Amino acid sequence: MFELPGLRRHLPLAIALGVDSIGTGISAPLLLLFLTKVANIPLAQAGVTLSATFAVALFVPAVAGQVVPRLGGRTVLIAAQVLQALGLAGFLVVRELPAIVACALVLAIGQRTFWSSVFAVIADASDSGPPADKDRWFAFTNMIQNTGYALGALTAGALLLIPGDLPYLLAIGANATFLALSGILMLAERAGQPTRTAPEVAPPRIHRAPSRPYLAYIGVSALFAFCSTLLGSGLAIYVVDGLSASAAVVGPLLAVNTLLSAIGQAPAVRLTRRFSRVRVMILAGLIWCVWGLFTASLGHTPASLIVPALALSVVIYSIAELLHGPRSMAFAADAAPPDQRSTYLSWFQYSFALANIAAPGVFAATFGIAPALPWLIASLVAILACLGLAAVARVLHPQPPVQN
């Protein structure tokens, strides 16, 4: 049932991504609580601190696009793990707000550097196998990361059984340790070496900004990413304030999504392998449109059916996510010129960064008008994304994969 990529030469990469995800799953759900309960920062200030540092880190993908081809994705990825570990370790020893902000900024830069380099390393690893391995690699790494995050989140839940500040200190310390271990494992990885170009190719060409069609694809991908991000941004508020349901169902609902993401990536790629990437992504967008309409209609659902209906909503969302994720990244990798791929993939991270900034703001601004409005907007955005992708695909032609 599972068609895995060739892992023999790239086990360090696979293990490192799993270790990284476990650590992230342990601390990410508790970071805001750590800042409020241990560092004694007011909730509003803590939220603004994390959001502001994330916004400041938006410069990272453009810089990474210059650095990754020169130093190699692996080197930049290791540096990202070091930065994240240092930022988290700083949280353990500082308590003044300026120092907390500095640590949060180091952490945010490290996180954005990680996402600006990891896909270049994965794409490089996929080149060592047959062309079909690219989709399998992105599906497999998504599966590893989702599984690791789920295991980490379960660990975080267990830590909360311990009274006092200790759970939060253990979570932050554990993630810093796991990040350091992930960086050490990456030292043994072969993929992600510096770009090598022919002598006649001028070096500046490698590092310039992506072409206009590729930038258009980044914009379209940001629309898809908005749909993908909205569930995490608004589900809890929608359940409690929009549907008057118990907050206790939010955790299990998100667990359903995590479980489906963990076990469904490889089968989703296998079942859709006969279709082009563009068709699969458009299908995912149409499913997201249906998901938005269905979720918006839950306000008219009888109270006894709210929980099953929410579960169905999460399943519909997860199907779209399973179809879109691997195909989107594989298309982004193959649409980039071979000698500029790492630069293009670094810029591609702006699609996720912009969505992560837009989704919470759009949800907050529209939910107060009507609880159904954010989900209706998601349906509209999904349709626009499908139309945009169909237009971009006419002028952006992926290069055939080159096998190392």
Image (cartoon, rainbow, N blue to C red):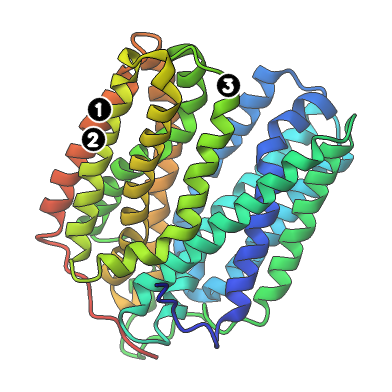
Quote the CA–CA distance across marks 3 and 1. 22 Å
Residue 171 or residue 155, whichever sits in front: 155
Residue 362 position (above or below residue 262): above
Examine the image and state in which quarter residue 100 appears.
Answer: top right
| Mark 3 or 2, nearer chain start | 3
Locate residue 300 relative to residue 88 in the image: left or right. Answer: left
Q: Which residue is mark 3?
A: 247
Is tag 3's residue or tag 1's residue first in the polypeptide sequence?
3
Quadrant of image for the N terminus? bottom left
Residue type beneath disc 3: Ala
Give the residue at x 81% y 25%: 37
> What separation in Å lies between label 3 and label 2 (alpha carbons)?
24 Å
Q: Residue 108 sits in which quadrant? A: top right
Horizontal side of 127 relative to 117 (left or right) equals left
Q: Which residue is identified by label 1?
A: 293
- Residue 160's x, y, as percent? 79, 35
Q: Are marks 3 and 2 in contact (CB under 8 Å)?
A: no
**Whole-Å distance between the Cαs marked 2 and 1?**
5 Å
Secondary element type, mark 3: helix
Image coordinates for residue 77, horizontal then vertical, percent: 59, 66
Tell me the kind of residue under disc 2. Answer: Val
Residue drawn at x 15%, y 54% is 392
Q: Which residue is mark 2?
A: 290
Q: Is residue 55 visible?
A: no
Please indicate whether residue 145 sits to the left or right of residue 4 in the image.
right
Q: Is residue 47 left or right of residue 391?
A: right
Q: Secondary structure at mark 2?
A: helix
Q: Are marks 2 and 1 in contact (CB under 8 Å)?
A: yes
State the residue lying farthest toward the top: 369
